[in-house]
Image (cartoon, grey):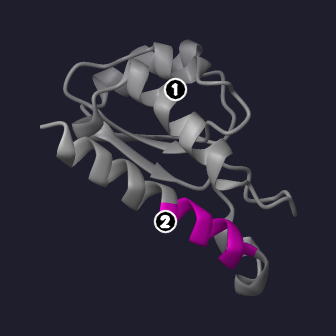
């Protein structure tokens, strides 16, 4: 969902019996994650793909950790916000690299706490 008013349509989504909801979350300050659906996995956008700004790893860590306060790690998938195919690879590679570095770090941290 690209910047929709999620609260207005959550009941329709629940009635569709979806397995995964993709939320373009980079501009919402995790507000969209407050509406949790039992048994649904979440793909949350963690940076704005349309911005030329490269999010530093610290910022990505912070965003994911905020999401993990609300969501269990086994239902959270992270990705950039929608629009990746509209950008040239050379423009998005640094941000995607930072995202992958952070995801590996957090996965290792989560694995070591089990």
Name the residue that disc number 1 marks: 66
* Magenta-span inclusion, residue 94: yes
Label 1's element? helix
N-term-proximal mark, 1 vs 2: 1
Residue placed at 87% from the left, 63% from the top? 52
- Where is residue 16 drawn, in percent x and y? 30, 31
Q: Are marks 1 and 2 in contact (CB under 8 Å)?
A: no
Give residue 13's quadrant in the image. top left
Q: Residue furthest left?
A: 114
Give residue 39's quadrant in the image. top left
- Where is residue 23 drawn, in percent x and y? 53, 38
Q: Nearer the viewer, residue 106 or 26?
A: 106
Is residue 45 found left or right of 89 in the rendered image? left
Q: Nearer the viewer, residue 3 or 93?
A: 93
Q: Main secondary structure of the magenta part?
A: helix
Is residue 21 visible in the rendered structure shown here?
yes
User: Which span is picked out in magenta?
Assistant: 92-101
90 in relation to 77, above or below: below
Is residue 30 found left or right of 50 in the rendered image? left
Is residue 46 visible in the rendered structure shown here?
no
Residue placed at 46% from the left, 49% from the top? 78
80 in relation to 110, above or below: below
Give residue 91's quadrant in the image. bottom right
Please tell me the numbered disc located at residue 26. none
- Where is residue 83 drawn, in percent x and y? 69, 62
Label 2's element? helix
Please tell me the numbered disc located at residue 100. 2
* Magenta-span inclusion, residue 84: no
């Amino acid at each position: 969902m690209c910047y929709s008013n999620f609260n207005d349509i959550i009941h329709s989504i629940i009635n569709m019996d979806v397995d995964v909801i993709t939320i373009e979350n980079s501009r919402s300050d995790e507000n969209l994650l407050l509406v949790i659906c039992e048994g649904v996995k979440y793909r949350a956008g963690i940076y704005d793909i349309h911005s030329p700004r490269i999010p530093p790893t610290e910022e990505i860590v912070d965003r994911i950790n905020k999401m993990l306060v609300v969501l269990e790690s086994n239902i959270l998938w992270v990705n950039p916000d929608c629009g990746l195919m509209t950008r040239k690879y050379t423009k998005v590679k640094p941000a995607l690299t930072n995202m992958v570095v952070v995801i590996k770090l957090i996965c290792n941290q989560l694995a070591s706490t089990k």
